[in-house]
Image (cartoon, helix red, strand yellow):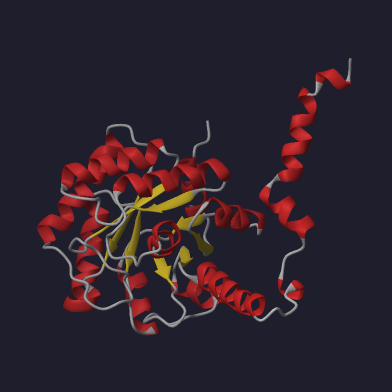
Amino acid sequence: MSSPATDLRALLNQDRLHVMPCCFDALSAKLIEQGKFGVTFMSGFATSAARIGQPDLGLMSYAEVLDQVRNITDAVSIPLIADGDTGYGNAMNVRRTVHGFAKAGAAAVMIEDQLAPKRCGHTPGKAVVSRAEAFDRIRAANDARTEGADILILARTDARHDHGLAEAIDRAARFKELGADILFVEAPKTVEEMHTICRELPGPKMANIVEGGETPDLSHRELQDIGFSLAAYPLTLMASAMKAMAATLEKLKADMDRTPDLMSFSELRDRIGFNDYYETSARYETSKRE
């Protein structure tokens, strides 16, 4: 029987790049699925902004993130990779996070080696924990999976920032040995560094493309040729939505015509699911058939 984790494994077994727009709520995830993308990622940066209106600096709790995971997996059928940050505590908290995300329907959970409270990978001030603590997090995540959590582990290291690429690659290689399914070296600064990551590390690798961030914004073909299996775009949808909303608010304030900027009411209703609801609910209107 298929599961989100099984579906994601099947995608990763394909010898190609999977472009992964990142969602931040159920509606953005639905739009990604409607756009025919095969997988999505719940961006911690975007989710923190959308859910609590605060920056991604470790302010959201485990319970808030878990609730958002449930909302998204309830709304879509494509696999969701969920941002588990540092695991919300020590190794025992990591185990709980992995079990919880699996029960909520996530296909994979990302666990990183940042010092709590974590920071967005392309903003200043981030630091990583010791190798021993970082390895314990991935060991605990794998233990939870061994105990029955049907979920993949995406292991992330931010060691490139303070300790250099070699340390980041060494950590990621050890993550793989400890059971990680997907490796993510955050914020390589050059195309050559991206080549080195894919050349030296085994298994599926993820690239994180932040427009205006530190990692080169390469084409999909270039990312695939380098060797990445996943390309996450964590802020693309949120940045475009925020720009559109800010512009429309200015037009509304100035009493200008804003209709050219709006999705039609008919399409909006259809994308949200009104038509599907009406079609399904019609089966239960027995009084009209009797």
> Image point 38% across, 39% down: which residue?
102
Residue 103, placed above or below residue 46: above
**Residue 49 sits in which quadrant?**
bottom left
Q: Which is more toward the observer, 176 or 138?
A: 138
Image position, residue 141 (x, y; %): 25, 45
Q: Is 18 displayed left or right of 168 in the figure?
A: right
Q: Quadrant of the C terminus?
A: top right
Q: Is 235 displayed left or right of 87 in the figure?
A: right
Image position, residue 286 (x, y; %): 82, 19
> Image point 23% across, 50% down: which residue?
88
- Furthest residue to the top? 290
Q: Which is more toward the observer, 115 or 48?
A: 48
Image position, residue 165 (x, y; %): 24, 77
Residue 97, placed above or below residue 249: above
Residue 177, placed above or below residue 254: above
Image position, residue 113 (x, y; %): 21, 61
Q: Which is more toward the observer, 85 or 36?
A: 85
How many dots with numbers?
0
> Image point 21% across, 64% down: which residue?
114
Q: Which is more toward the observer, 145 or 87?
A: 87
> Image point 18% across, 72% down: which residue?
167
Q: Is 50 displayed left or right of 178 in the figure?
A: right
For the question of whether residue 34 can be seen, the reply is: yes
Residue 86, placed above or below residue 171: above
For the question of whether residue 107 can be seen, the reply is: no
